[in-house]
Amino acid sequence: MERTLALVKPDGVARNLIGEVLRFFEQAGLRIVAMKMLRLSKKEAQEFYNVHRDKPFYDSLTDYMSSGPIVALVLEGENAISRCREIMGATNPAEAAEGTIRKSLGLDKEKNTVHGSDSPESAAREIAFFFSERELLAGQR
Ligand code: UDP
Ligand code: MG
């Protein structure tokens, strides 16, 4: 069993697509084991995306990610990290495969509706960024 961190980004929440995004993950067999809605400050968005601090899109990305509420999820399943990334599709919705979240719902390369951790190290860091031990224990079945 593996865990990963996924986000419904501000464009997804703003367009009433929370349930739609959850449906993609649940129908693929990933279990939601923790979930919350919150709004990141600009500073928190900068910290979350610190790995991209030198990229040209960093300032716009962190403005966007702090522009409205998001939903944070911990998903659990076999190979959850790579499966979540597959279900999401490529970063640019125009390049994402048919049937993926980003192909179906994404607006553009920035406002692409979902985030998913890209490695076990990122997943551990990103889960701890959003959830306490107590919140993680609550979802155990
Ligand atoms: N992003 C962007 N322009 C780019 C590349 C990425 O605005 O040229 C945004 C987009 O929202 C993406 C996020 O920055 O999801 C993080 O980029 P990354 O390369 O890590 O893509 P992801 O892992 O989300 O597919
Ligand atoms: Mg990434």
Image: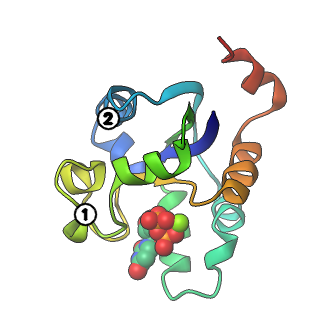
Q: Residue, x 66% and y 18% (percent of image)? A: 139
Residue 118, horizontal then vertical, whole percent = 57, 60
For residue 60, above or below residue 68: below
* Image position of 117 (left or right of 86): right
Helix, strand or loop at label 1? It is loop
Residue identifier under label 2: 24
Residue identifier under label 1: 96
**Disc 1 to disc 2, C-alpha distance:** 15 Å
Mark 1 and 2 residues: CB-CB less than 8 Å, in contact? Answer: no
Q: Residues within 10 Å of mark 1 (few under 14, many from 20)?
A: some
Residue 107, horizontal then vertical, whole percent = 24, 61
- Looking at the picture, which amino acid does disc 1 mark? Ala
- Looking at the picture, which amino acid does disc 2 mark? Phe
Q: Residue, x 74% and y 49% (percent of image)? A: 124
- Quadrant that contains the C terminus: top right
Q: How is the image coloured?
A: rainbow
Residue 61, horizontal then vertical, whole percent = 49, 70
- Quadrant that contains the N terminus: top right
Q: Which of the two labelled residues, at mark 1 and mark 2, occupies the earlier sequence position?
A: 2
Q: Residue, x 50% and y 46% (percent of image)? A: 7
As drawn, the label of residue 42 is none
For residue 17, above or below residue 50: above
* Image position of 78 (left or right of 86): right
For residue 4, above or below residue 67: above
Residue 63 appears in view = no
Residue at the extreme right of the image, as rendered: 133
Figure quarter occupied by ligand 1: bottom left
Residue 25, horizontal then vertical, whole percent = 39, 34
Q: Quadrant of residue 42?
A: bottom right
Helix, strand or loop at label 2? It is helix
Residue 4 appears in view = yes
